[in-house]
Amino acid sequence: MESWKKNLWILWFGSFIVSSSFSMVIPFLPLFLIELGVTKNTEMWSGLLFSSAFFAGALSSPFWGAVGDKYGRKPMIIRAGLVLFVIYVLMAFVTNEYQVLILRLLQGLLSGFIPGAIAIVGTNTPEKKVGYALSMMSTATATGGIMGPMIGGTLASLFSNRMAFGLAGMLCFAATLLVIFWVKEEKFVPSKERVSVMNTFKVAGHNKALMTVLMLTVLTQFSVMTIEPVLPLYIAQIGGSSSHTSMIAGFVFSIVGIASILFAARWGRLADKIGFQKVLLIGLLAGGIGSLAQILFSNIWAFSAIRFAYGAFFCAVFPALNGLVVKHTPSEFRGRAFSLNQTANQIGGMAGPLVGGLVSGVFNIHSVFLMTGVLMLITTGITYWTMRPSRQQPVEKGSLSS
């Protein structure tokens, strides 16, 4: 097997495991808090503990990206994997909610597995295969996000909440061992600049194309996440009072991810042929129309079909954004570029649910679908305007053609 393919599949597995571990605490976190003796403000603590890791990760990503560009992305992946192993094992022994909060903050501050993995894949994959490879990495995180809650809930039911954390740690350790022994980082050009977050922002600020991609990442993630807080409620509402409502709600909620798994690689191959910009425009336009179309259907099965179609197109968006990061950055800055992209993603991911929940509370659920669709269409227009060939040019010779 070619080196880049071996790297891709090992890092795919590792990213799947890490993505799963981040989301697998969702089903049992409130129950785990009750087990720790938290009987007041349980919902508040659940939200705080879940979001704290993402908030800390948004702050620390640029630093670890700079370290990775100087000393190698593989060491950063190994560091992050071992940290996750230790934190999850310690999580199995906590005795109060404050210890959980500290560990979740450390989990975010010391993370960096997925940005490092994407940086290696984006740099070491042949140019004609980068779209496909980045789409596969996107599929890994999407699959992990879908499977994580199911894996976590199943482990907690079969064993215990504490055992679920311990097993998550062991899976992260196994993924890290695979990276240590099997992943080879080739084409690595160490950055000659000192490790500095301020310098990272300074260099990025002079790269207009990269700043455009970061802005689009924030807008896209913000748009899609506005619907997250209210979607389960809406699915349950239109699903009726069937005894299988919970199962149906779980299926419909995950159907976008299932579509992503089926279609992401196809969009990646298309991007290698026609360019990331065109694929991004198609995905955003279809995402906006699909979000608006969901307002029209109150039948659960018709709604599911629209969600699936929406997912089949929207899964093109984030791999295309990652591809544009590769296109518009030199290899020695790529670790920092993907870390900044991760920060942008997390900023949008934190702000979106807050705004979506607020809009739903003030108006109604349909207004959130309307807002999501309009935001995506606005993002489509911004993408078209800012990324016309005459306005953006690759920063390095030999970059991917669009």
Image: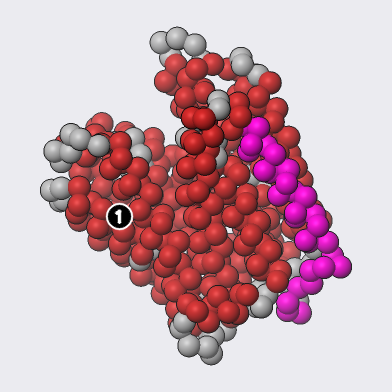
Q: Of 109 and 93, which appears nearest the observer?
A: 109
Dot 1 alpha-carbon crowd within 10 angstroms: few under 14, some 14 to 19, many 20 or more: many
**From which residue to which does the magenta span run?**
369-397
Q: Is residue 192 magenta?
A: no
Residue 165: percent from the left, percent from the top?
26, 47
Please identify the residue farthest to the front as the structure is shown.
362
Residue lying farthest right? 390
- Type of the residue with mark 1: Arg
**Residue 18 placement (x, y as % from top left):** 41, 54
Residue 305 in sight from this viewpoint: no
User: For the point 21% across and 43% down, which residue is it?
Assistant: 163
Tally the numbered discs.
1
Horizontal arrangement in the rendering, residue 185 relative to residue 105 (left or right): right
Q: How is the image coloured?
A: secondary structure
Residue 263 placed where, x, y %?
66, 41
Q: Is residue 274 above or below residue 155?
A: below
Q: Does 380 appear in magenta?
A: yes
The reply to whether residue 97 is visible in this rendering is: yes
What residue sits right under mark 1 in the picture?
104
Judging depth in this view, the residue of 215 and 173 nearest the camera is: 215
The secondary structure type at the circle numbered 1 is helix
Quick check: 246 left or right of 128? left
Q: Give the quadrant of the N terminus.
A: bottom right
**Which residue is depicted at the point 73% across and 79% down?**
396
